[in-house]
Image (spheres, rainbow, N blue to C red):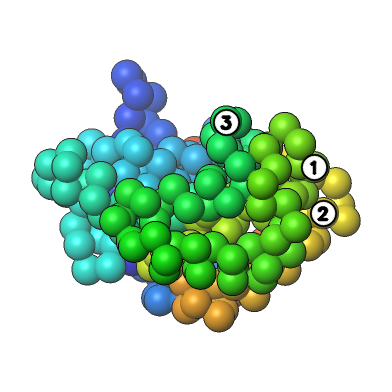
Amino acid sequence: MRVDAVTKAYGQRRVLDEISFSVIAGERVALTGPSGSGKTTLLNCLGGVDRPDSGVIRIGGQSLKGIDSDTLAELRRRAIGTVFQFFHLLPTLTAAENIELPLQLMGVPKDERRDRIQALMSRVGVDHRADALPSQMSGGEQQRVAIARALIHRPVLVLADEPTGNLDSKNGAIILELLRELTDELATTLVLVTHSEEAAAICHRRIELRDGRIVSADE
């Protein structure tokens, strides 16, 4: 993934100011910095949720600049997984059905979907909750399901926005270890927005933002 001179403003306020960096395949990078520094806006641009005003973002060799909405949606379905602070599971779907959704959108055959879901649910330790609705699961269980959903289609990039921010320290540590292990196993790039030192510690390096600019970046 490569980010070149990305700028984003809302009205007169420039939220991202000439942001440039690259991340190699399988690398974990923590985006740190105070609230309002532009971390979540940058994550939204990386995920194609927001479009930069200028600059170029490339994911898996594909530039996001100038592509139409259908092509962008297909790229997001195929190449990107997302983990949120508040889980964002669909409340009327079971754990297994939430995890299955990315595979359905990609047209993966039913038998293959079933096998991949069972294997990954077992890997993240929620195979016994396959038929549970989100309202019937603990926060830690919901986030494990969310991680499985983000990784089930084997994306090249996972974006995580404060994934432990709504969990106690014990469950937070479990979630971080799962993210570290699974991204290693799948050689998936992880970009992690966090205020947590524990979360940043699972990453290979950090990029610190302040007032929309990179103020420090580990090599």
Mark-to-mark CA distance, 2 and 3: 24 Å
Mark-to-mark CA distance, 1 and 3: 16 Å
For marks 1 and 3, the one nearer the N-term is 3
* Mark 1 lies on residue: 138
Q: Is residue 94 above or below residue 82?
A: above
Residue 181: x and y in percent read 64, 75
Tell me the amino acid under the disc marked 3. Answer: Thr
* Mark 2 lies on residue: 171
Secondary-structure class at tag 2: helix
Q: Is residue 21 above or below residue 31?
A: below
Residue 209: x and y in percent read 52, 49
Residue 148: x and y in percent read 57, 59
Secondary-structure class at tag 3: loop
Residue contact at pointers 2 and 3, CB within 8 angstroms: no
The residue sitting at 87% across, 56% down in the picture is 170
Task: Tell me the crowding category of disc 3: few under 14, some 14 to 19, or many 20 or more residues within 10 angstroms, Cα based.
Answer: few
Mark-to-mark CA distance, 1 and 2: 10 Å
* Mark 3 lies on residue: 92
Q: Of the numbered discs in the image, which one, if any, rests on residue 190? A: none
